[in-house]
Image: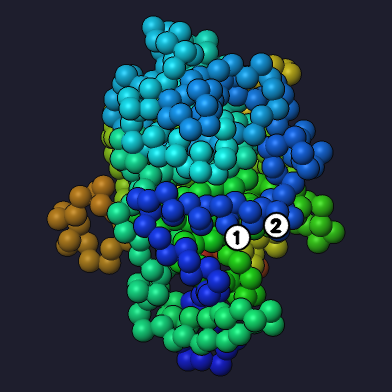
Amino acid sequence: MQIRSADLNFRSNLAIFLNNVNQQGMHLDLMSLENLEISEDQHRAKKEHKSCSGLSASTQGVAPKARSCRGRSRLPNRLIDLEHFGPDALDACVFTTDSQDIKYAALSYCWGTSDFPDYVTTLFNFDGKIRVLRYADMPRTIQHAFQICRQLKLRYLWVDAMCIIQDSTTDWHSEASKMAAIYRGSYLTIAADASTSVYGGCFNDRSLNQTEQMYKPVRIDHRLEDGRRSSIFFSPATYQNMAHATIGGSPLSKRGWAFQERALSPRILHYTFAQLFWECCETYEAEDGIRLLDESWGPVRTLCGFVESAAQISNNPQYSRDLLLLRWYRDIAEPYSTRRFTVWSDRSIALTGIVEALGPSINAEYIGGIWMHSLEYGLGWKRNGPLHDIDTGSLNGSSRGATPSGPSFSWISFLGSVCWPIDAKELGKSTSLITLIDYGSGSPFKASSSSDKASPYSPGDDSGWLRLRGRLKPARICISFEDEDILDEIDYGDWLQNALKGRPGDEGVVRGDVALDWCLKVDDVFCVPLHQNKAGVIMALIVERVLLLPGQYAWRRIGLATVTDVPVHWRTGSSHTILLV
């Protein structure tokens, strides 16, 4: 986060960092178990953080709300017992929890490329793992997780590869359905951020000090009222917070399933290549003791605190669902859309835990990544990258053969990263130009039933649809280059922006910018205006007509337009019932 120059009477923007000297003993080699002093120190911080202390997975001191969030039926069926053979033994075993209320840690990591390596639990070796897990046979990441838990005196650990029978469809579906609750109900999550596979380990060779990475920082030393010495560092705002850079740019942060593992965990130890970081619902802490401050000189907000803070926002008299939705699309949907999935269909499933956690606060129904409240904004996403041919297979590093599926209006169905061109100041102040009539899954040509909407937060499927009331306006997509002589030298797929204008003979002038979802050869299209801001600019879906059944037509999204020159008839005239699929 940045401090504006006007706030501090400086000429340049600054990033501000705080360091307390009493934390300097944390400069330690992560290859040594002595580094876990920081883990224990940060581990104790949960007692001082109000929003963290109520999230403890232990049976003592758990707030009723936190306890209800991790109901017994959602506990993991199995855990690893690290003290089954004694507190000093290296070997462990897998055991069945029998719905006991147990304090446990969870591991978030990258598997790597192997489907069923020797260390994973299968139907063939399940009985053996119940008896003993040989420490020497474990990959480095799991060995390090064992060490971390023992140093923190956490007896139980959950690792998906070992606590789920991987080749049992029944067991996998049973435990995968609890995945979000398992991480949310854990006492602590150990994140092996820097490793590309389970064989990479957690610990680094040497930690980097954040001040060494800053460009000419200005340091101001002072003494606190309790006698401790502390320092404030001022650095150009171009310096990116090391916690954000190393965690956000890590191999683990490219993995799709790891997003909800981080977002739902009450507290996390991040093992990065640079140093060890602590993340909880209130703050980040760094191994070198340096903390980034936000504009209010407070701790920078964390991803894992977003879900828990949503409930606090909804209980605030100044609560605004539009604000919460803005954070959903900016802080959840946008970064999530960049994640990779081995199985592309998991993209909607791996978001379900966050959706279910936020649903009561947002208090709106949901389909395909979009909330029905302020629907005009949710539909207004656009491609955030180069155009791809619609038949392109591997995108975002995902599985081969991934092809667009699901409703066209859903950003989850788009094979790539997306963004919302929403100005936070305009959110909730623009005029909506559409009305939701109905939505569901299955056939849109039959009467809706309860089975079509089994859950208000269901991930949706390939047959999701929306029925809206709005205006359909004809338009034409044209080339935005002024020099037409260069057109023959430019491949169609390289056009990042096209232009929108009215068709010949249409009343009034229509001009705007177009971002197509796919590399499609289209000219004449229709637009569905979504909302209009105070400056008169309209955000509109670009759609084309498709035949679903004999005599039954619908509309499919193919892009988004920002219309700057808007004729009167775009804002007035008769409306239509529009079926989006």
Q: Please tell me whether mark 2 or mark 1 is closer to you in this view.
A: 2
Residue type indicated by callout 1? Thr
Residue 264, percent across and down? 60, 42
Q: Secondary structure at mark 1?
A: loop
Left or right side of 139 for 452: right
Residue on which the image places disc 1: 283
Q: Quadrant of residue 567?
A: bottom right
Residues tagged 2 and 1 counted as in contact (Cβ below 8 A): yes
Crowd band around label 1 with a 10 angstrom C-alpha radius: few (<14), some (14–19), many (20+): many
Q: CA distance from mark 2 to mark 1?
A: 9 Å
Label number found at residue 502: none
Percent x, y of residue 94: 51, 19
The numbered mark, 2 or 1, whose residue comes first in the sequence reads 2
What residue do we see at 51% from left, 57% from top? 38
Q: Which mark is residue 49?
A: 2
- For mark 2, does the 10 Å Cα neighbourhood hold few (<14), some (14 to 19), or many (20 or more) residues? some
Q: Residue at x 42, y 21 (%)?
A: 133
